[in-house]
Amino acid sequence: MDKITFAIPSKSNLQYLKTCIPSIRNNAFRGDHNIIIFVDSDEDGTVDWLVANKDRYDFNFIVNPDLGKKLYGIGKAYDKCIELSETEVFMIFHADMILGKHADLKAWEQLKDRKDVVCATRIEPPLHPNAGEKILKDFGMYPENFKEEDFHEFIEANLNEEKLTEGIFAPWMMYKDEFLSIGGHDPRMHSCREDSDVFNRLHLAGFNFKQPWNSLVYHFTGRGAGSFDGDKERHEQWKKDMNNSTREFIRKWRSNVKHTPLMKPIVPPVYDIGIKIINSNLQLVGLLEPWCNNLYVDCDYRLYIDSEQPNTYDILATKILPIDEKPENDIIISLDGKNFNQQDFAYLQEISQIIEQSGQVGESKLGQTNIYVTINNLNEYQNDLIKI
């Protein structure tokens, strides 16, 4: 196989990097792959360790120019590593992962077309549900108690596994120029959801997703990002970041993250939707604003704009409008805030797929809800979102 570049962001992840980097050097089919680490925060001596071990493990690293003041963001960190890579192919890798024997080669063998995106199969301790997209097997909760010999035995027993499924998650491999052709990661997904966004875009751009089950990595399950609740302080910040990034994802895609059980993206149509609310209030404004292009309300929404504008790329002053403003959206959803309930909201969250399946030009009531829909046309805009 050709040499590739491992792109690894780190946010005070020294505990995991100490295991991650040696695993690439010891377990990869090629011992000379390039490794680039982006240090986004350093509260644990990461930079000092990288300086001391740079020659030993032969890697390069980049430090956030605003280290200690402002996070660069995981998507931008990946993109910086990829931009500086000198190989045709890169592999997105997490600091809290351990490469299994020849996982690089087994993934490379499936990279048969320039439009292929190949991901390794994660092995994780049984902390989160499994829909069939990963292997739940406990080889340790932390690097300090990692059962290395048992892990290697398991890998050896599965190197000839021929199972191949269609899905995508980290770690994933593809051609650098093909990735750059869609503009890289979207910076508006600053801390989370950057992967779901780029997977949607790759799917719409016609890329093929492959997951070979003989390319294996061990994943300590969200320790790098903070999704593991065993680290309370980091987990609390992750929850805030995830909430903000999820709202940005919905603003962009008019849908929450969707995929098959094996992690192939499902991308509903993106329509131009306006929501018109009589008897509105700030709670409803906050709930429904991400789900539309424009929101027309009869309450004072200025406090919401002041509080929410720092969290979004959308210009809320032009997005939220007085109710007497005439809507020019392709699809108008009308509702009464006094009658709006949880069932109505559940339908609104699936409105794109509902319209795709049964929508037609004209006016109608949405099932047994309190929602009325006016469809002026059914133009779809999701392909406009492929490139940044």
Image (cartoon, rainbow, N blue to C red):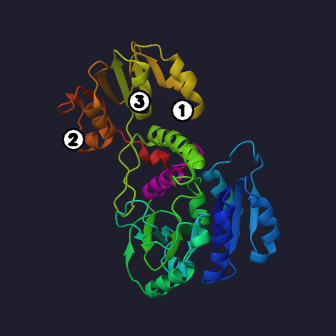
Label total for image: 3
CB of mark 3 within 8 Å of CB of mark 1? no
Say whether marks 2 and 1 touch (CB < 8 Å).
no
Q: How far across and down, in percent of the image, does residue 225 sit?
A: 58, 54
- Identify the amino acid type marked 2: Ser
Q: Nearer the viewer, residue 136 or 142?
A: 142
Q: Nearer the viewer, mark 2 or mark 1?
A: 1
User: Which residues lie in the magenta part?
Assistant: 187-205
Q: Residue 273: image x %, image y %? A: 37, 31
> Which residue, given by chain and number where applicable, does mark 2 sit on?
358
**Quarter occupied by residue 315:** top right
Q: Is residue 309 left or right of residue 372?
A: right
Position in image of residue 328 (x %, y %): 39, 24
User: At x 27% / y 39%, what residue is drawn?
Assistant: 355
**Foreground: disc 3 or disc 1:** 3
Q: CA distance from mark 3 to mark 1?
A: 15 Å
Q: Residue at x 40, y 20 (%)?
A: 296
Real-space CA distance between mark 2 and mark 1, rounded to the nearest whole angstrom: 29 Å
Residue 17 is left or right of residue 309, and the answer is right
Give the label on residue 314, or none.
Answer: 1
Question: Which is more N-terminal, label 1 or label 3?
Answer: 3
In the image, what residue occupies the spot 48% across and 62% down?
A: 169
Residue 193 shown in magenta: yes
First reached walking from the N terminus: tag 2 or tag 1: 1
Neighbourhood count class around disc 2 (C-alpha, 10 Å): few under 14, some 14–19, many 20 upward: few
Q: Is residue 195 magenta?
A: yes
